[in-house]
Image (cartoon, helix red, strand yellow):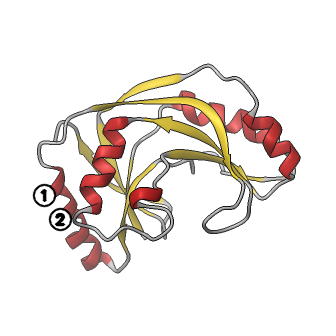
Amino acid sequence: MYSLNVPLPSAVTALAGRLAREWPTATPRARGEHTLVAKRLGEGDHAAYARLESKAREILRGQPTFEARIGGVEQFETAATGPSPVVYLAVESPGLVALHERLCERFEPVEGVEGPEYVPHVTVARGGDAAAAQRLTERAIDPVEWTVDSLSFYDAERGQTASTLSLPA
């Protein structure tokens, strides 16, 4: 699966790592694997990726930078896929939501997680004790704010960034 992701500042990934250590019964995201998905683009081989990236770059032409903010810790009690519950850092960003909606007009939304169901988030951990997950969501955190000035084309099969797009595009 290829996706368009928002690169995360180290303060966000460090926060996710600290919170995950407080939920030892869950499976945390490994260091370097925290993501903020703007839109899943599709699957395929290298040729398919080239077409997906080209189409996305065309759609993103003129895309300005935008603000993002981690404002709290929340959970999906029942995840759309994979083990539950899922504790995550909630992302507040009207610019990201608008970007997601723009991309959904040209790339088919993934049912249950995109389109109207899209919740911008950074997964901390999943599949552990539900009471411990609830305790994490009650934690107050210092907000983390940043300007999104690039986007990454991400190859989930290889677990790496395939290319980057600087904003404004």
Which residue is at the front of the view, 106 or 1?
106
Q: Give the residue type that dot 2 points to.
A: Lys
Residue 155 is labelled as none
Q: Is residue 27 left or right of residue 158?
A: right
Residue 117 image position (x, y, % from top left): 47, 58
Q: Is residue 119 left or right of residue 107?
A: right
Q: Which residue appears at 30% of the width and 76% of the height?
A: 46
Residue 37 image position (x, y, % from top left): 44, 52
SS at circle 2: helix
Query: Is residue 22 placed above or below 123 in the rendered structure?
Result: above
Q: Quadrant of the image for the C terminus?
A: top left
Residue at the front extreme, as displayed: 116
For disc 2, the marked residue is 55
Q: Give the residue type that dot 1 points to.
A: Glu
Q: Is residue 10 left or right of residue 22?
A: left
Query: Is residue 93 placed above or below 38 in the rendered structure?
Result: above
SS at circle 1: helix
Residue 140 image position (x, y, % from top left): 70, 23
Circles 2 and 1: CB distance less than 8 Å?
Answer: yes
Residue 22 shows up from this direction: no
Q: Which residue appears at 41% of the width and 26% of the height?
A: 146
Q: Which residue appears at 66% of the width and 23% of the height?
A: 141
Residue 107 shows up from this direction: yes
Real-space CA distance between mark 2 and mark 1, rounded to the nearest whole angstrom: 5 Å
For disc 1, the marked residue is 58
- Disc 2 residue crowd, few under 14, some 14–19, many 20+, Cα 10 Å: some
Residue 156 image position (x, y, % from top left): 48, 65
- All told, the count of numbered labels is 2
Q: Is residue 76 left or right of residue 32?
A: right
- Disc 1 residue crowd, few under 14, some 14–19, many 20+, Cα 10 Å: few
